[in-house]
Image (tube, rainbow, N blue to C red):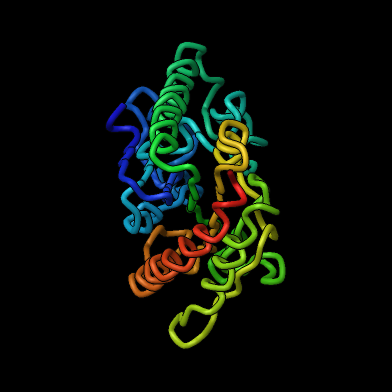
Amino acid sequence: MATNFTFIKGNSPLVITAIHDGHKVRNELKSLFALGDAARLREEDPFTAFWTDFSDNRIIVNHSRFEADVNRPREKAVYQIPEDAWGLEVWKDKLPQDVLERSLKLYDDFYKAATSYFDELFAQNRVQIVYDIHSYNYRRDGIDSEADPMENPEINLGTQNMDREVWHPVVDTLLHSFRNFNYAGRNLDVRENVKFKGGYFGKWLLERYGKAICPISIEVKKIFMDEHSGRGFEKDINLISALIESSIAPVLKALNEIETNLA
């Protein structure tokens, strides 16, 4: 299991995750894929693990979402038809049942490990914030095309998986921090619940820990890479890294101000 997931636990009330960073798939799947390596990479979230380094609590999923997607409900965790995967034909043929079950075991192992991990964190801290970091494509029609910027902010915060009334000081602080960051002489377009509202991982956290947890899905438009080739832009990767790091102190200060409301 250690090769599939990385769980690093410290003492902070902040966890930073990159649950779609992984690209590895187990050997038995490789000959079954209809999709090539590059096509799978395009729907993954490369470089997001690099942005988890700013907390002593980190979760990184090393296997590909095309093996088992831990941000989907269990019954949808293994993409089986094109409707599960952006219209893509993932497999040459229907997956054999034993192969499917081995992928689902990986999913189950993740949530077993996540349960132990967060239970231990809550034994230390009364509340937890989660930066659940993802990225998304915006040039699906070609490298020279661009999806409508009005519907595709550079950073989208998904906040449906929390008690928003309780956690508004933290969310508002994060929005303010991201919007005011100096990104090479400009400010980024940062909005809430425009492109994405949050996935299953955040829903699971909310259902298990209630108003004591604040899972924020941070979706970064792939302005930091060429989504078709997979090539990263070092300057932008480092700027986003600095953006995330700069938000942590004000967010933790906001957390201190609301802890009395969570008693």
| Quadrant for the C terminus in the image | top right
Q: Is residue 147 left or right of residue 131?
A: right
Q: Is residue 255 left or right of residue 117?
A: right
Q: Quadrant of residue 235?
A: bottom left
Does 165 appear above or below 7?
Answer: below
Q: Residue furthest top?
A: 98
Q: Is residue 13 left or right of residue 198?
A: left
* Residue at x 54%, y 63% (from the top left corner): 221
Name the residue located 52 percent from the left edge and 29 percent from the top edge: 91
Q: Position of residue 190 (x, y in %)?
A: 60, 70
Q: Nearer the viewer, residue 97 or 168?
A: 168
User: Residue at the spot x=54%, y=22% of the render?
Assistant: 93
Can the viewer see residue 27? yes
The quadrant of the image that shows the N terminus is top left
As drawn, which residue projects farthest toward the bottom?
A: 185
Tally of numbered tags: 0
Percent position (x, y) of residue 68? 48, 30
Q: Residue 37 location, x and y as percent?
A: 40, 43
Out of 112 and 37, give the one closest to the viewer: 112
Q: Residue at x 47, y 59 (%)?
A: 228
Residue 89 in sight from this viewpoint: no
* Above/below status of 107 relative to 151: above
In this orientation, which residue lies closer to the viewer: 143 or 77?
77
77 over 230 or under it: above or below: above
With respect to residue 182, does 22 lie above or below? Answer: above
Image location of residue 84, percent across then percent down? 63, 35
